[in-house]
Image (tube, helix red, strand yellow):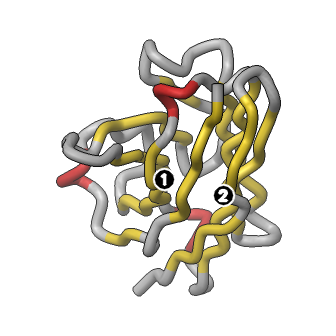
Amino acid sequence: QVQLVESGGGLVQAGGSLRLSCAASGRTFSTYAMGWFRQAPGKEREFVASISWGGGSTYYADSVKGRFTISRDNAKNTVSLQMNSPKPEDTAVYYCAASSAAGIVVVATNYAYWGQGTQVTVSS
């Protein structure tokens, strides 16, 4: 069982930066691939980024590639999403998720554990 708690959301100006964090409980965090998803009002949840269990592989949605960076610290049981140069269209509730797979996981249904989400609002 893994419990996930996101933090760091808020209001940010377009072109600024924001860092989201996700703290995980459990002693097996390092065996889970982690991901970030987001859901804007009236839209379906969409994939943002994924990182393998060891942190050696990352993968991004085209819409955030080059602007967002996912990272993890297995010693601290945390995964982060650094958001640089955010755009108004990045406004959404952001969720972190954990998958028992070892590598990159893009599909939401392959994640067994989810956080409660943190709101990110990007003003123009």
Looking at this view, is 31 or 124 the one in front? 124
Residue 8: % across, % down: 72, 61
Residue 77: % across, % down: 70, 71
Relative to 17, is 49 on the left or the right? left
Mark 1 surroundings: few (<14), some (14-19) or many (≥20) residues within 10 A? many
Relative to 56, is 117 on the left or the right? left
Depicted 70 relative to depicted 53: above or below: above
Disc assigned to residue 9: 2
Q: Secondary structure at mark 1?
A: strand
Amino acid type, label 2:
Gly
Q: Residue at x 21, y 41 (%)?
A: 43
Q: Secondary structure at mark 2?
A: loop
Proximity of marks 2 and 1: CB atoms separated by less than 8 Å: yes
Could you tell me which quadrant the N terminus lies in? bottom left
Amino acid type, label 1:
Tyr
Dot 1 corresponds to which residue? Answer: 94
Label located before the other in sequence (2 or 1): 2
